[in-house]
Amino acid sequence: MSSVTLDHVHKRFGTAKGVEDVHIHIESGEFFTFLGPSGCGKTTTLRMIAGFYYPTEGSIRFGSQEVTAVPPHKRNTGMVFQNYALFPHMTVFENIAFGLQVRRVAKGEAKERVERIMDLVRLTGYGERRIDQLSGGQQQRVALARALVIEPQILLLDEPLSNLDAKLREETRFEIKRLQLELGITTIYVTHDQSEAMSMSDRIMVMQGGEVQQVGTPHEIYHFPVNRFVASFIGETNLWNGTIVGVEGDEVKVRTASGQVLTGLRQNASPKARIAAGESVLMSIRPESIQESLVTEGENVVTGSVEMAEFTGACVNYVTRVGEESLRSMSINLGRPIKQRGETIRLQIPKESIYFTE
């Protein structure tokens, strides 16, 4: 296995910017995800790692080896494409064995390796089937087996689950993570699906407009977003603008546009947030942290009018109008009567759950 380093990598297509100054180090054996909306530069970055694109500026290393100008077939990477790119005229066995034939691996060894990888991806007994006789999930596993059978240093996956239905996506997601943990292979995964990224990754790189917005663990990305884009793109959140009216030790008091004064903690501020009296600040408050309050007053207790209530069984999702602001909350179902549209509701926002960003 190998680490991957992108050293201030840029990619331009004529005058168009593809990727701007990507500077990251991916550890050996890490599951690292490029996450962002369509056109953000994540697939372009993956293709530079694979060798299909060469950087306009910057360098790429696998471990200590410089590979910036090394052609794809000499990089020892395995890639799974969005459309799988399987050969319809070949059997499952022949598709998986193709990379070994190109590398002139002896037939006996190739057969052994293909059978071993088919067992690993749970395709034993499917070797003689044609590709059109397989389900979408089975085709995806063939593509994964073909990438793994060559024993690559690095596994690259470009939105491999996008063609599967919701249930199959979840099952296949689990299989990919199981394989990655079992093999310990360095894996770089591209997706626009936040739930995939959060559930599978050791670390995530969030991209937008060809630029890196934030790199961190799922916990860091979710709870400590560095800007408005990351906060709104990762999961659901409430974004409230406010002005800091006081800083007392670790506590930060913020007045919202509706006149509410909320208390947060300095330690929950991103590096770019300016924590000082008079400064404007953006607060990110996750709905699941907000609970219905039984008291009328208290720290961070706000009162509003229910605009929408959604009962899901385990919880009740509310959209509440608090002055000029809309507040989404997710209350655990404790058997209390559900508030209806137009009713008054009091909600408590724990100070530990308010995150300050720019």
Image (cartoon, helix red, strand yellow):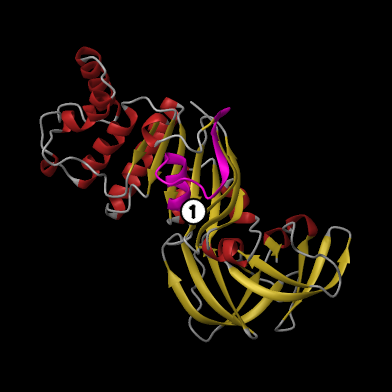
Q: Which residues are magenta?
A: 42-65
Compared with residue 195, is residue 285 higher up or lower down, i.e. above or below? below
Q: Quadrant of residue 61?
A: top right
| Image position of 231 (left or right of 95) | right
- Depth check: give the residue in front, 326 or 220: 220
Verify whether residue 299 appears in magenta.
no
From the top left corner, tell me how far across and down residue 183 is, in percent.
Answer: 42, 26
**Is residue 56 magenta-colored?**
yes
Which quadrant of the structure image shows residue 358?
A: bottom right
- For this orientation, the residue located farthest to the front is 14
Tell me if residue 174 comes above or below residue 295 in the rendering: above
Q: Nearer the viewer, residue 235 or 154?
A: 154
Q: How many marks?
A: 1
Give how far across and how far down residue 108 sits, in percent.
20, 12
Q: Considering only vertical position in the picture, is 254 above or below 193?
A: below
Mark 1, residues whose alpha carbon is within 10 Å: few (<14), some, or many (≥20)? many
Left or right of 80 in this view: 210: right
Q: Amino acid at mark 1?
A: Leu
Say left or right for 100 vs 267.
Answer: left
Reading the image, the residue beneath label 1 is 35
SS at mark 1?
Answer: strand
- Which residue is most to the right? 248
Q: Residue 104 placed where, x, y %?
A: 26, 20
Would residue 165 be found to the left or right of residue 315 on screen?
left
**Residue in the image at 11% along x and 44% along y:** 132
For image coordinates 28% across by 48% down, the residue present is: 168
Above-or-below relation of 356 to 196 = below
Q: Position of residue 184 (x, y in %)?
A: 46, 27
Which residue: 38% across, 31% down?
Answer: 179
